[in-house]
Image: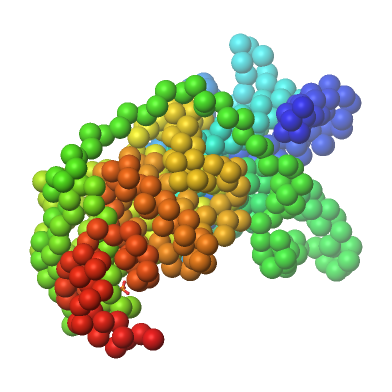
Amino acid sequence: MDIRRIGWAALVTVIILIAVLPVPEFWITQLNYIGIGTLAVLGLILLTGVGGLTSFGQAAFVGIGAYTSAYLTINAGLSPWLTLLIGLALTTASALVLGWITLRMSGHYLPLATLGWGLSLYYLMGNMDALGKYDGMLNIPGLSLWGRDIGHGRVFFLLTSALVLLGILSLTFLLDSRAGRAIRALKSGSQMAESMGVNTIRFKIGIFLLAALFASLSGWLYAHYQRSVNPSPFGVQIGIEYMFMAVLGGVGHVWGALVGVTITKLLADQLQVLLPRLIGTSGSYESIVFGVLLVLILKYAPDGIWAFVDRKVPKRQRAADWEDAPALAERAKPATGELLLDVKAVRKEFGGLIAVNDISFQIMAGQIIGLIGPNGAGKSTTFNLVTGVLGLTRGAVTFRGETISGLSAREIARKGLGRTFQHVKMIPDMTVLENVALGAHMRGHKGVLSAMTRLDRAEEQTLLKEAQRQLERIGMGDYLHDMAGNLAMGPQRLLEIARALCSDPALLLLDEPAAGLRHKEKQALIEVLRQLQREGMSILLVEHDMDLVMDVCDRLVVMEFGTRLMEGTPREVQQSPEVRAAYLGTEH
Ligand code: ADP
Ligand code: MG
């Protein structure tokens, strides 16, 4: 049996045993707080660990859930079940507004903004008369269901445990899906994901919202378990503590939430007893211990405690259950010889530097066009102008008769331009198959909710089948379940080509695919390019390596210092004295 199943079964058994055995009430209480905390940290694992968005404002969302329910049950006499929904709705509204404003910020602005958000909410809670100021609110009703009290002790433990397990399960499902791949791609910057058709800002807001909802649920449980609220558990300091727990447990691992919260809680209890004995005075010296601990973890176990467990658990070799899935629909391809890409006098200036000086060329369907030139000639810049990564200073690009200059990289990808990157951009801790399936993002549409509830499986199978097909197409069939991060450079480049093919492109753009390849790997690449050409694929190849382009291209555009030096067949280019001078002048 799968070790994961055994783990789940063991955990459920332990939970039931704890509930029925005479475990001291003190421990049940501890476990209940651990469960409540785990829900909030689970959100952080998704947001910060997986999505790479650092937030210290998680505790504030816990506060929104807690205060909404406290206020409405006390003052309006509403049922806690109803106020749970109202709290979630209020959380949704504030997370959307806040996310909309802050998630466009880059670098350190986001954590700073969440600190600001956490502080303002803390002072708001502490200064509003209606919320009882810093004293908070007392006499919050406990939870009951059909007249039965489920608000404390073992029943509450079962409720919290069930919610934690559901949370862990749904996030595990989410990360193993189309939406999950998009979320996992966010961390390494949005450029690659956008080029795969992922609307990165939407997914960022999505995980911000989801994390906030987990926090809000945690706050609701907290308010009705504790039966009182005050601002202190929802301040920025607790927000930082949540982050500590996530980092300790393993910020990239869903199970890390449970581990991090449990250890922190138990340790805090021990320290509260131990430290006064050691130091002689009482005070909150735990913070210092936690601070030291955090530094040690970041230094010696940056992936957290769960990473050690994760390494021991054999990676699940996903059963290929997608063999019978129907093939994905393909876009209508241009007829051979049709004008596919028309680059019309494109220009790019960086300040005073003219990186691309009115370059024009065309690609007919079925052709492989090489864009060559010495280092710094402007090849990559031209490539980025066509793919929408950079904006044009002047000129126009049309693709299949439609103007694409001015569109975003994502919109251009949707039109049917598949691309690779000069510096390979993949997700190292995802399998080759999953990485390639990210390329098929635009061909599916199941979102976060269907993924969390596993209602996405039929579509998921079609996407994985396509990924496998494209990998096999270019001879990478043996690598499906390897971690992408373990690949050598040659297979990495092929992975990127398979990922681009997965988007069903009408034109493939490759930026220096031979860079860093060994001789044998280069031969394999040439084979793949020839095969794609035979299959009728149109390719724009930006390349530095002369042998490769001479070998596979139908025509070449030679650039030097941003301008077009000449255009012609490989033979004509080889015989041109200007090209020789350009290359010999800057190289060898
Ligand atoms: P190639 O890919 O042919 O080696 P690039 O297109 O990368 O050349 O660069 C062309 C010129 O534009 C170089 O002089 C380079 O320094 C400059 N350049 C490229 N990107 C930028 C940028 N973002 N800002 C300023 N200058 C740039
Ligand atoms: Mg370049």
Query: Is residue 114 at all visible to an observer of this figure?
Result: no
Q: Eyeballing the image, is 537 above or below 66?
A: below
Residue 404 locus on image (x, y percent):
16, 51
- Indicate left or right for 322 with 263 as reference: left
The foreground one among 450 and 28 is 450
**Residue in the image at 69% along x and 30% along y:** 161
Ligand 1's image quarter is: bottom left
Q: Tell me how the rendering is colored.
A: rainbow
Q: Is residue 555 visible?
A: yes
- Location of residue 379 in the rendering, given as x and y in whole percent from the top left corner: 27, 69
Residue 316 sits in quarter? top right
Residue at left offset 40%, top offset 27%: 327
Picture residue at 72% right of the left edge, 65% below the top: 300
Going 43% across and 68% down the picture, which residue do you hit? 515
Residue 503, x across and y down, in percent: 35, 41
Residue most toward the top? 146
Front residue of 391 and 472: 472
